[in-house]
Image (spheres, rainbow, N blue to C red):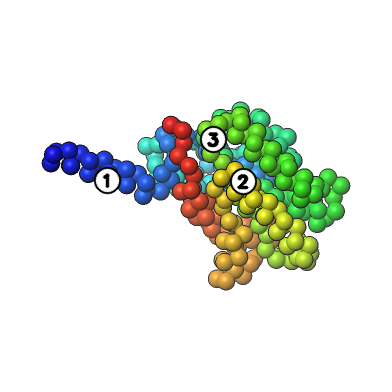
Amino acid sequence: MKLLAVILGLVTFSVSARAAEPAPFLYNHERILFQGDSITDGGRQRAGNDLNHIMGQDYAYLIAARLGAQFPDRQLTFLNRGISGNTVTDLAARWQGDALDLKPDVISILVGVNDTADVVDGRAKAVTAGQFEQTYDRLIEDTLAGLPKVRLVLCEPFVLPVGRVKAGWEKWSVEMASRRQIVAKLAAKHHLPFVPFQTVFDGACRRAPADYWLWDGVHPTYAGHELMADAWLRALDALPPAGK
C-alpha cells in the first residue's frame, strides 16, 4: 500500500507539474503558425533559410524565441505567414496554401485593422462589418473542418489615437470597436482563446503615452510587441488539450 501511495503521489505530482508549467498544451514537434497583416509580418524574410529573419521583428518572433529557448526538448516549429496590408478577405483567399496546407497544430490569427482602414478611408474594396464577420466565421469553420485537431487563437485587433488615427479618431474608434466585438463573438462561438490586445494597450497607456506603444496608432514599437507577446502567452494556457 505504501508503494502504491508513492506511485500515485508521483503521478499526481507529474500531472500537476505539467499543468502548472508554461505552454502546457504545446506538444513535441508541433507547428505554430502566425497569420495576419503587417503587425504579424514584421518585415519577415519571404524566402531562404535565414533563421535570423524568417519570423520577422515582432510579437511572433518574441513568442517563438521565448518558447523555443524554454522548451528545446519539444522541437517546436514556428511559422509566420503574415502579409502587410492584408484584410480578412485577403487571408481567406490565400488560406489553403498559407495555412491549411502547412498542417499547423496551432494557428494564431490577428486581422482587422486594414479592414477598418478601408472603411475609414472610403476605399472601394472596403467590406462591411457584417461581411467581415461572415468571412472570418467561414474561415474558422473551414479551418476546423480541414484540420479537426487544430487549435486556433483569435487576437483582438487594436488601435490607439496617434498620428492619422488620432486625426480621424471618432470614425476609427467606432469601426474598430465593431470589428473587435466580432472577433470576441467568434471566439466565444467557437470556444477559442481570445487575446485582448486592445485592453492590454489601453492599460499600458496609463503607464506611458500611446505613441510609446504604437508609434503610428497601428504598428507597435518594440515595447508594444513585448506587451503583445506577454498577452499571447497568457492566453496560450486557455488552449484545450490536443487530441493526442
x, y percentage for residue 18?
Answer: 35, 44
Q: Earlier in the sequence, mark 2 or mark 3?
A: 3
Q: Residue at x 61, y 70 (%)?
A: 209
Q: Residue at x 85, y 53 (%)?
A: 122
Return the mark for residue 132: none
Where is residue 8, by image quadrant? top left
Mark 1 = which residue? Answer: 13
Q: Earlier in the sequence, mark 2 or mark 1?
A: 1
Asked whether, in this view, residue 66 is left or right of residue 11, the answer is right
Asked whether, in this view, residue 131 is left or right of residue 230, the answer is right
Q: Quadrant of the N terminus?
A: top left
x, y percentage for residue 170?
Answer: 77, 66
Distance between the Cα atoms at labels 2 and 1?
35 Å
Amino acid at circle 2: Lys
Q: Residue at x 48, y 42 (%)?
A: 240
Distance between the Cα atoms at labels 1 and 3?
28 Å
Callout 2: helix, strand or loop? Answer: helix
Q: Is residue 40 visible?
A: no
Callout 3: helix, strand or loop? Answer: loop
Distance between the Cα atoms at labels 2 and 3?
16 Å
Q: Residue furthest front?
A: 1
Query: Nearest the camera: 165 or 197?
Result: 197
